[in-house]
Image (spheres, rainbow, N blue to C red):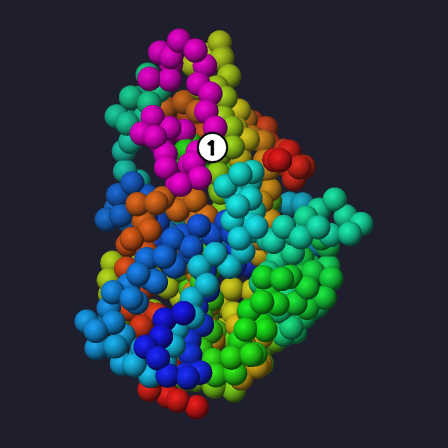
Amino acid sequence: QFSTGGSNRSAIWLDTGIHSREWITQATGIWTANKIAKEYGQDPSVTAILDSMDIFFEIVTNPDGFAFTHSSNRMWRKTRSINPGSHCVGVDPNRNWDAGFGGSGSSSNPCSETYRGPYAHSEREVKAIVDFIRGHGNMKSVISIHSYSQMLLFPYGYKRAPAPNYQELNELAKKAVSNLAAVYGTKYTYGSVVDTIYMADGTTIDWAYDNGVKYSFTFELRDTGRYGFLLPSTQIIPTATETWPALLDIMVHVLEHPY
Amino acid sequence: DIDDVGHKYHLELVLEDVLDKDSTVNCTAEVLYHLGNKNIAPAVQFTIEGELKNTDEADNIFYSRIKSLEKELVAENIPDSHGSVSPEMEPIRLLAQVASGYVIWQNSTENTKFQLAQIKHVKQVKRSDDCLEFDYMILLHEMVSQEIIPWQMTVLWHPQHGVQVTQDSCQPKHALE
């Protein structure tokens, strides 16, 4: 938690590493956390944000999966939950949220990489965040960071109907992506999850959005497939560096549009 | 939409040399996904504007190096967990990318998006002729399902004859753990 005081201030939630094989995200998370702390008192935007809002940042959102990518299978995506009656392990934590849960954008097969789980919020990693955000009651933005594809996405993934503030989210995404590209020329596409990537239900940002968090975004960081999940560690700092202005754009917009 | 035939896509694209970002070539292509039998690869026709770079020198250096190895090349996990590829393995990786392109083409539908995720294992196979032969076990990442699919492929290469995949087969998922 990044806070300069106050009591239950409006807040922004950030998470990385919900899919354990997306190693660029946890690494970017650490760099970004340090950047937030470093820039308070230096950068006017960061200072303005933290003077009236809190930031919550979960770096290793899927710890069991992350440990497994180190010990056994670098390509592991899901949690490490035992699935009764199946030899297959794990639930996709980004299909386990209670938003459009159980649709065609997730799988009912425990052996699948997009297995939704036995019921919404069955995964402790997901339930912990759900309880936290609900309990907090004043979360104004949820930004969930993934890789790879170079995209900035907003709701919905579980239905084709545009989100009520589609225009605003789309404009903000366009601006953020442009500022990201300005750093090293990295091109991102942007749009709703369903239009830009694929149908996906039970996702983090759809749940957040349907629970009143108007500014919900998912980043898909570098690259577009040349290295994919095995992005060279030499690209950690460049990736975090270029993503920072995009994150800042979103956070400043949240600050300047209280609701 | 072509009734009773399938879906045809007309594409205009730019090819970029992965080894030289400033080297680009325009390309137009037509891709036809067949209705019905999904086991047929999509039909592809393309034209390239201009010429691709000449790579004879680098090809011959790699060819000579492998030919002069005392023991057959064996390697695994390219790139490694941290995305690193040793300079000696870089051509092996590039060869796998080209060869996996063929495998991907043969197995693509309108609902798939495959990428080469990693080379799990590669083993050179001695040949009596001039060609180099490599037996690869690769991991393909399919974007829509998010699945990691192990795939075996036998790849032949010669500087003048190009790349050929002589055999390939999808492996069971548990071939991994």
**Rendered residue at 44%/50% (across/down):** A23
* Image position of A214 with respect to B54: above or below: below
Quadrant of the image occupied by residue A143: bottom left
Q: Residue furthest left?
A: A42
Q: Chain of mark 1?
A: B
Q: Amino acid at mark 1?
A: Asn
Q: Is residue B79 magenta?
A: yes
**Rendered residue at 54%/73% (across/down):** A132
The x and y percentages for residue B76 are 48, 28
Q: Is residue A248 visible?
A: yes
The x and y percentages for residue A30 are 36, 57
* Image position of A223 with respect to A116: above or below: above
Instruction: Tell me the quarter of the image containing the C terminus of chain A.
Output: bottom left
Q: Is residue A83 left or right of residue A210?
A: right
The x and y percentages for residue A241 are 28, 59
What residue is shown with label 1? Answer: B77
Q: Is residue B42 visible?
A: no
Which residue is nearer to you in this view: A11 or A4? Answer: A4
**Rendered residue at 39%/46% (across/down):** A231
Q: Is residue A168 left or right of residue B1?
A: left
Quadrant of the image occupied by residue A188: bottom left
Magenta part of the chain:
B65-92
The x and y percentages for residue B27 are 37, 52
Q: Residue furthest right?
A: A85
Instruction: Tell me the quarter of the image containing the N terminus of chain A.
Output: bottom left
Q: Is residue B18 magenta?
A: no
Which residue is nearer to you in this view: A248 or A220? Answer: A248
